[in-house]
Amino acid sequence: MEVNSSIPVLTPNNWNTWKRDMQVILMHYGCWQFIIKTEPADPDVGSTYKEKYDFQLRKDRTFTLIYTIISPELKSLISDTTDGAVAWKILKDHFEPMTRERVIQLLDEFFGIKYQPGEDVGIFLCRVNTAASRLQEAGHKVNDLYLGFQIDKVSSSRIPVNSSTNLQMERRGIYCRQDRSGTNT
């Protein structure tokens, strides 16, 4: 089974999951460096013909993979380029515009995250971190007070906060303190 056949095509409704899946596929094929601009635009001057050919093949594959895994109505967005990094930026700007409305929407989503009864605390914290990361990508630094507000939802839900929970929170840079009675605050 080919790796890129395992994810659904990009539609107007699945950008966030498609973006993460596509990142993994591009990493699998050695193409993600072109998107994050750690790979130079052109091969070194002293490169052999084979190295130049392999470089161009990976660069072309970056665009090809993106183009083949998007729905037909979205292909027109990137039809004017053959550069994978440019295509990625066009799609990102289309689905994640840097506007005040977008930041407000993301803030609403962030504060709308609720702890579900029976949910693993680590999963809840991951959802909070994902929302915080999306806000940061949109240019809005998430205040520690906001994170504390979200974590307070966990402690106010009467979840037993044990050493495993504390470790999960610590790994995510979220700390809670225990008072002398042993309850978390």
Image (cartoon, helix red, strand yellow):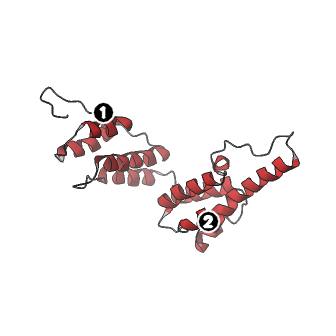
Q: How many marks?
A: 2
**Res. 2 visible in picture:** yes
Q: Read off the residue under disc 2.
A: 2
Q: Amino acid at mark 2?
A: Glu
SS for tag 1?
loop
Tell me residue 46's x, y (percent). Answer: 87, 39
Could you say where residue 155 lies in the image, as x and y percent from the top left? 20, 42
- The answer to whether 44 appears left or right of 84 in the picture is right
1 or 2: tag closer to the N-terminus: 2
Three-letter residue code for mark 1: Tyr
SS label for mark 2: loop
Q: Quadrant of the C terminus?
A: top left
**Camera-nearest residue between 45 and 50:** 50
The residue nearer to you, when weighing 153 against 3, is: 3
Can you say which quadrant of the picture contains the N terminus? bottom right
Residue with the mark numbered 1: 175
